[in-house]
Amino acid sequence: MEFRVLGAMELGSSQTTTEVPGVLQRTLLAALLLAQGRVLLSGPLIDELWGERLPAEPQAALCAQVARLRRTLEAQERGGRRRLEHRTSGYRLHVREGELDLAEFRRLRRQAQLSGSPQEAEDLMRQSLALWRGPALADVRPHSQCEAAGLALQDAREQSYVELFEFGLRIGRAGEISGDIEELTLLYPLNEALYEQLMRARILSGRRVGAIAVYQRARRCLAELAGLDPSPALGRCLAQALADSNAPESGQQLP
């Protein structure tokens, strides 16, 4: 069974996919998955599912949600209900290695960061980002800890794109990835690292006028959206783009 949280929450295999129905079931599953095999106490689980709007009988309501989630697990995998184990003080979900897309994302990203080969690192980072299907944990209970974890994962995804493009620039793929970087600056208009990478990609591709245009757009977006000035790194890229000589040739690798 595959547990997929990097997008709409679902259970899957090579043959079938099962959506996790109901916000309470999704929040319960998300909390158990984020616990990474640890037992979650009933009290914190009740708080996570209902917050301050507790049902009349919280423990009975939790048991009902556990039963429903077990039926969903069973529908995806024969015997799947046994994965959700009851302990004296709470519940634990058994997940095997390689079954959770979030764990795979983190594993591949870590391998990329530790790789001594920029080419291999870029390949690994692309594999990790390909696991994403949309916002992580986006359909759990609002204002829950699971929702906050999803927002933190979005930050990790954004930073992973920065790392991916850095590997691409190092192996001389400036011209190939320039369009991808530009698309991400539209998605993350306050990420200065992406603007810097786009300027560098255009300079390395011999498009210094285009790099200057990126700086101007970055300055405008930062000022209008956050009241910020461009960073010194963007200023250095602008100075390089404006230089009359010593401009890098198209395809030149970064030092």
Image (tube, rainbow, N blue to C red):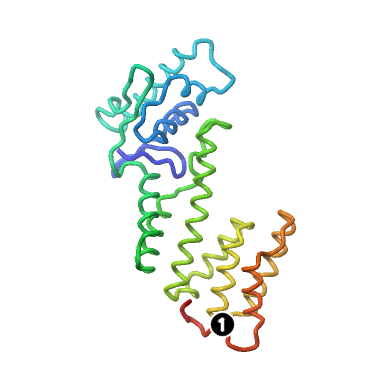
Q: Is residue 14 above or below residue 117?
A: above
Secondary structure, mark 1, is: loop
Residue 239 spot, x, y in % from top left: 66, 78
Residue 219 spot, x, y in % from top left: 71, 65
Q: Amino acid at mark 1?
A: Gly
Quarter of the figure with residue 67:
top left
Nearest the viewer among 132 and 253 is 253
Residue 232 spot, x, y in % from top left: 65, 68
Identify the residue at the far top of this view: 56
- Residue at horizontal 37%, vertical 36%? 36
**Residue 12 as seen in the image, left or right of residue 146:** left
Total marks placed:
1
The N terminus appears in which quarter of the rendering? top left
Residue 94 spot, x, y in % from top left: 30, 32
Identify the residue at the far left of this view: 78
**Residue 28 as seen in the image, left or right of residue 218:** left
- Residue at horizontal 43%, vertical 54%? 129
Badge 1 crowding class, 10 Å Cα cut-off, few under 14, some 14 to 19, many 20 or more, is some
Q: Is residue 57 above or below residue 216?
A: above
Nearest the viewer among 224 and 21 is 224
Residue bearing the label numbered 1: 206
Q: Is residue 219 above or below residue 242?
A: above
- Residue at horizontal 44%, vertical 33%? 30
